Amino acid sequence: MPELVLPDRLRGVEPVRSIRTPARLDYEFTAGRATSRFLRGVAEKRLLGQRCPVCRKVYVPPRGACPTDGVPTEEEVELGHTGTVTTFCVVNVQFYGQAMELPYVSALILLDGSDLPIMHLLQEVSADDVHMGMRVEAVWVPDDEIEPTLESIRYFRPNGEPDAPWDSYKDNV
Amino acid sequence: MRDIAVISFAQSPQVRRQPDLNEVEMLMPVVRDALAGAGITKDRVDFVCSASSDYLAGQAFSFVMTLDAVGPWPPISESHVDMDGAWAAYEAWVKMQMGHVDVALVYAYGKSSPGDIRRVLTRQLDPYYLGPLWPDSVSLAALQARCGLDAGSFTKADMAEVAARSRRDAKANAWAQLSGDDDPAELLGRDELVSPLHVHDCPPVTDGAAAVVLAAGDVARELCARPAWIRGIDHRIEPHALGLRDLTRSVSTEQAATAAGVADGPVQLAELHAPFTHQELILRSALGLGDDVVVNPSGGALCANAIMTAGLIRLGEAASRVTAGDADRAVAHATSGPCLQQNLVCVLEGE
């Protein structure tokens, strides 16, 4: 390496040890055909999944492809507003931007008729009482507040049915 | 060295904006067509290599969801590059040379429409000196064109000829985004976009996807009547700092061309990944292509330039012309980075 000779005006000057270079880019997200149909369904208070023509599994929210078979999922399937808790997490840690009161429960819920759980909030139940196999139902926002977003379901709550048998959700934990 | 060939190529329509489809929906028919072109199903594929960029989607690990298009279950052998798909093809070729893989699927996709591509591409510049200045991709290309014009390497009329020829050739390419009959003199009469570049000197902003299937030795012969054999492939890169480079030539292309053996035989056809008109002129010279070589019969990147994808399309276009018997020996080229920073050269031959 040749010796680095600084010009006189830079000698004895404190070296730059760090710089700050903020960057921001804005994007328009494309939901795609399948997910758009799902979101439009939500705006009508309907939950629409799609079935794989090969393995017959029903995905929700659909992304238009079966991740197992790599084929388009075109057959639409209307799902119930009830489901089964497959796994869950009791959140006890406060973090930036959090709107929920602690502790709260975030759960994976297998909607009846589907083969892929969605993540949502569980309310109207003590965190201590939440368990795998618990049967729950969707609580929607008032009709005049419904929009094409999963936030149109405020949360899920227990619906009082007996627990689902393990075999009915064991492939989704 | 094992004999490895391109045996199938497919692409999506290359369009300015694909607002209906997400990436996996755009890609799925392309993967299906590439496999069908090779007469195989996914079970026959030993290795999948994909190319895309999170900076286009604005989403971390965005390629993971696109893997749905290949049905990665039971678990598959798979890799990804944050580079143009031509480099994914290179990785697959290396893996095939090691002897573990006989059939590889290589795909690439890029939707530029969700973001502002000229700003997005500034993020590939060095983060200390150039990146913070946000010099956009067209401005940097204009700087390179100015260097070439001042050095007398080419004229603006030469550049307009490249644009007119590309658009004319693209009329025969159903997948191209731009095509038409343009008079070079009339193109030169229009306003400049970023001096000295006019709109016709610049690539369109494109959403698109492409895929090729590679196969080795007798498997390639079994699956394809006339495989496009990869006789040489190499890629080289130049320094990150533009000030350290001679922008009027492409040293890395010259080196890759020598290593790939471009001059070892006559070249009939070349697909060059030149997003800007003057870059085709620099590349022709770097590759030592004579006037008798057919350049970019597809219309090239001036007529469709899906980022991360347009280089793989050059490989696919050149290979499919060898397979069709239009050429016995062809060159495919791909580029990446500002002002032709990194270049890949591939020599393809029929048997």
Image: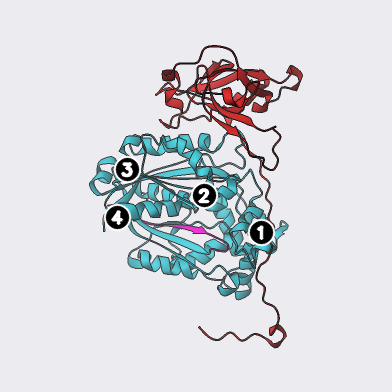
Going from the N terminus, do you reach mark 1 or mark 4 first?
4
Q: Chain of mark 1?
A: B
Type of secondary structure dominating the magenta stretch: strand
Q: Is residue B182 left or right of residue A132?
A: right
Which label number is shown at residue B46? 3
Q: On the image, numbered disc 1 is attached to which residue?
A: B136
Q: Chain of mark 2?
A: B
Residue at 67% from the left image edge and 27% from the top image edge:
A151
Please rate how many residues cluster around mark 3, counting C-alpha atoms within 10 Å: few if below 14, some from 14 to 19, many from 20: some
Q: Chain of mark 3?
A: B
Q: Position of residue B292 (x, y in %)?
A: 43, 61
Question: Of the residues tagged 1 and 4, which is closer to the observer?
Answer: 4
Q: Label 4 is placed on what type of residue? A: Gln
Q: How far is disc 1 from disc 4 in space, using C-alphas?
A: 39 Å
Question: Of the residues tagged 2 and 1, which is closer to the observer?
Answer: 1
Q: How far is disc 2 from disc 1 in space, using C-alphas?
A: 29 Å
- Say which of A158 and B80 sits in front: A158
Q: How far is disc 2 from disc 4 in space, using C-alphas?
A: 35 Å
Which stretch is magenta?
Answer: B328-340
* Circles 3 and 4 in contact, beta carbons < 8 Å: no
Residue lying furthest right: A144
Q: On the image, numbered disc 4 is attached to which residue?
A: B97
On screen, residue B75 above or below A86:
below
Q: How far is disc 1 from disc 3 in space, using C-alphas?
A: 40 Å
Q: Are marks 2 and 4 on the same chain?
A: yes
